[in-house]
Amino acid sequence: MIASISPRPVLLYHCETDRTTDASHSRRLFAAAKEPKGLWIAPCDQHERIWNALPQETDARTVAFFRKNF
């Protein structure tokens, strides 16, 4: 299904050592998505806490993606 939302941009974030869902899930989604797309496998370990673990980098990556694609 992710390929069908193109040309809408897709940005995926995932924690590298996620204890809930393996990062391979986001890698597969990214591979299936069409451009424009982005993926960041971040050095964190909690599925839903990427913004708490790395707030400045997460903000910067999000803003950059939006500026580039919207």
Image: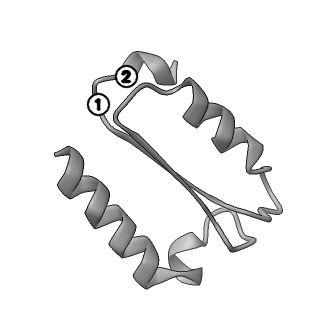
Q: Is residue 41 left or right of residue 24?
A: left
1 and 2 marks in contact (CB < 8 Å)? yes
Q: Residue at x 64, y 43 (%)?
A: 26
Q: Is residue 17 left or right of residue 8?
A: right
- How are the colours assigned in the image? one colour
Q: Quadrant of residue 30?
A: top right
Q: Is residue 49 left or right of residue 11?
A: right
Vertical side of 21 occupied by 64: above or below: below
Residue to which mark 2 is pinned:
5
Amino acid at circle 2: Ile
| Front in this rendered view, residue 41 or 55 | 41
Q: Is residue 67 left or right of residue 39?
A: left
Amino acid at circle 1: Arg
Vertical side of 46 occupied by 25: above or below: above
Q: Quadrant of residue 18?
A: bottom right
The label on residue 57 is none
Residue 9, position as x, y percentages in the image: 32, 37
Vertical side of 30 occupied by 42: above or below: below
Q: Residues within 10 Å of mark 1 (few under 14, many from 20)?
A: few
Q: Residue at x 80, y 65 (%)?
A: 17
- Label 1's element? loop
| Front in this rendered view, residue 68 or 8 | 68
How far apart are the two marked residues, 1 and 2, measured between alpha carbons?
6 Å
Residue 54, position as x, y percentages in the image: 53, 81
- Label 2's element? helix
Residue 51, position as x, y percentages in the image: 50, 75
Q: Residue at x 16, y 45 (%)?
A: 70
Q: Residues within 10 Å of mark 2 (few under 14, many from 20)?
A: few
Q: Residue at x 73, y 50 (%)?
A: 23
The label on residue 8 is 1
Residue 1, position as x, y percentages in the image: 52, 18
Number of disc labels: 2
